[in-house]
Amino acid sequence: MATAASSWSQLPIDILVSIFCELPIRQILRCTLVCAHWSDAVRSLRSSSRLKLPPQFPWLLFSGERSHSGLSVAHFYNHLEKASHALTLPDPPIHRRLCIGSAHGWLITADHRSMLQLLNPLTGEHVDLPHLPDYIKRVYSLHGELRHFKLDDCPWYVHPGELRSQFFKATLSANPSQGSYTVVLIHGGLFKLSFARAGDEKWTTLDGIMHCDAAFMDGTLYAATRSGEVRAWDLSAPDPTPRHILPAIEASRSHRYYLARTPSGELLHVRTDFLFSSLFDCLTNRRIVKVLRVDVERGRSIEVGDLGGCTLFLGSNQSICLSSAMFPGLEPDSVYVTEDDRCQKKQKEDEQVRKLMAYRLTDDKCWSIPLPNLNRSLLIWITPNICNTDYAT
């Protein structure tokens, strides 16, 4: 037995890496604890620019906390395994950050000073983003101290500690570890759309208002408004201009619109009515999710009654669409939504308690999913990633 154990610990790193590539992220993290040789193999996997892990099941990130030893700890929950676990994160503490988006295994966060930063919670890597968009003006006292912020689209002054409440949602075009990426931010009382490329020192604001979601597909940025209109931009152009994709559908306080890319490369336009749904809605099978398949070239869409065996994960994250066949136990043709009412109810961040709802398109069944008894002022899907590349498709 000792010889067998010794042979496993002495396998060449390239063979270990090829084995680790087939494992879920949680098991890869455990491999780093086996021995120094295995830890080196995981480090080699992380730094590779060509190896890709298989699609991973998204985790739910809960609000963090300070441990007894003073470390910043975040709690994650794997709905498929019904298991939660904690990870130590770098400062600034995760429980003092507002998470406004996640994509490619990274979080987009705003700290208590409203400074924006990208963070990979598994590797601890972080990237500072440009300072505030130009339409946000600083107001100083006679002694040179920052007193307030003034927004062009807001009639009142905003306290520095409350400015980040103006950041609604953000997303990424690619894994920041690759060095080339674009961050898109939905912000302000008019829900404007701004972007910053890697290395930019300031944000560029695009035309249009009242956006609620954005997604990248094949190098193009697509954005949906709160009335369901969809437009597209080529951000590689010197002066990006919008291209009309779909007209407005319906504007309502109870509706949220999302954009998602399927594993086959199609764009989905999803409308949910979870924000104000009640138990009565679930029992009476009221249709509270509507999914359209979009033809981006012709500017047309058609409603679908299923997801082709896929499952959607919606919320403050960049929408995730996975084949349920890859994850036994996952409900096919279903939508999992984390309720996020920051834009609907003017609650303080620490007073919000988000829930996880699920809806199956094929029979209009809706149900609430029990979650661990953890602080839920933050609840966001994130697909864990420790590599410099994105997942295989």
Image (cartoon, grey):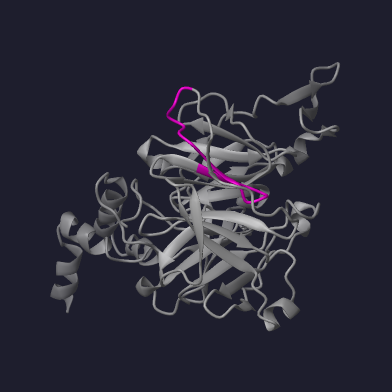
Report whether 233 appears left or right of 144.
left
The one nearer the camera, 66 or 80, is: 80
For this rendering, which residue is in front, 181 or 374? 181
Give the x, y percent position of residue 93: 62, 48
In this view, 262 is above or below 157:
below
| Image quarter in which the C terminus is found | bottom left
> Which residue is at 65% across, 41% downward?
111
Q: Give the total number of marks visible in the rendering.
A: 0
x and y percent of residue 268 in the render?
A: 49, 57
Q: Nearer the viewer, residue 47 or 179?
A: 179
Q: Is residue 91 above or below residue 260?
A: above
x%, y% of residue 86? 53, 63
Could you say which is closer to the camera, residue 379 or residue 393?
393
Question: Splitting the image into 4 quarters, where does residue 392 fall?
Answer: bottom left
Please state the extent of the stretch shown in magenta in the rendering: 222-238
Look at the image and say whether residue 227 sits in the magenta stretch.
yes
